[in-house]
Amino acid sequence: MRRQTNGRRRRAGLRGGHLLLFFLVCVGFVALASGSSARFGLFHQLTLEVLGPLQGAFTTVSQESVRLKDRYITLWNLQGENDQLRKELERYQVRLGEYRESYFRNRFLETALAFKEKEEFPALTARVVGKDPSFWFQTLIVDRGENDGVAVGMVARNARGVVGQVVQASDNYSKILLANAPSSAIDAIVQKNRVRGILKGAGKKGYVLQYVLKNSDIQDGDVIVTAGIGGLFPQGITLGRVSKVRSQRRGMFLEIEVTPAVDFSRLEFLFINLSENLLPGERMEGALSHPGGE
């Protein structure tokens, strides 16, 4: 009971103190307002000394509140401007991507047109629509088929060189075995000295040129082209460049690695040679009766 009574007395004392302070502040303001502007008495001076800091603090708080409000409004406006600028930047980036795609597509079409005008064979343009990721039989599916005149055995090329050969055709689509597939082999020659060999596909590693004798003059950078043997590929189509030559102690042949001229990972369009209509049993397999060089 005593504790509760003491608590009530303390709360009542605090309320009384607050009321007294408020009363004194009001009296001070009234005294300042009613005082003579020519001369202040002691009471007015004491009141001014007490209320001056309070008024200064109040003014400072008011000014900071205004500044905070202005900063908040400014930041809010900046946030809105940033959001708008970010949206515009995204739109410009999309447009830039479209312009780049149009530019590279235009360059490809120019190259394709120049290729078709330069080559004498009837070239059918085909677009790549699918890819078989299997290692041994790496194939592409294109949107041209028997209705377009495509037949099994036809050669697929682009402006850089040999892409592969048609191994399956339906009415509107065809499957092309890539030249770098491990199951493919092409009769090839070294362009500078006509040394012959078999170009075997090595998947992502490109090609290996086999059955070239050790006494052959083969160097890095030599161009490898089709030999034109057996009627499979016309002679002189670019296949790639020699990237490494090794000679082992054992054996009679060099180990030759060849970098493909065609970038098989970026094929979008290719050309099918409609004049090359081979028998269904013929595939990209070469046979050399006399391995080595001429």
Image: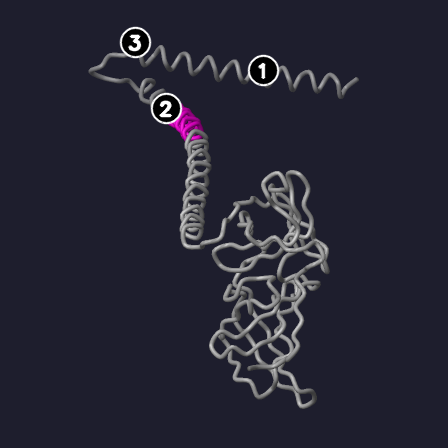
Q: Mark 2 = which residue? A: 59
Spatial separation of the CA atoms under disc 1 and disc 3 = 28 Å
Q: Residue at x 69, y 49 (%)?
A: 168
Q: Disc 1 or 2, which lies upstream in sequence?
A: 1
Q: Is residue 31 above or below residue 70?
A: above
Labelled pair 1, 3 in contact (Cβ < 8 Å): no
Q: Mark 1 = which residue? A: 15
Q: Mark 3 = which residue? A: 34
From which residue to which does the magenta span run? Answer: 56-81
The main secondary structure of the magenta stretch is helix
Q: Nearer the viewer, residue 97 or 154?
A: 154
Residue 10, percent across and down? 65, 20
Q: Could you say whether the residue bearing mark 3 is in a helix, strand or loop? A: helix
Residue 108, percent across and down? 45, 48
Q: Residue at x 63, y 42 (%)?
A: 145
Q: Residue at x 62, y 70 (%)?
A: 199
Amino acid carrying mark 2 in the image: Thr
Residue 118 in view of the camera: yes
Amino acid carrying mark 3 in the image: Ser
Q: Residues within 10 Å of mark 2 (few under 14, many from 20)?
A: few
Horizontal side of residue 250 vs 36, given as left or right = right
Q: Residues within 10 Å of mark 1 (few under 14, many from 20)?
A: few
Amino acid carrying mark 1 in the image: Arg
Q: Residue furthest left?
A: 38
Q: Is residue 218 above or below residue 238?
A: below
Labelled pair 1, 2 in contact (Cβ < 8 Å): no
Q: Residue at x 58, y 76 (%)?
A: 196
Spatial separation of the CA atoms under disc 2 and disc 3 = 22 Å
Marker count (numbered): 3
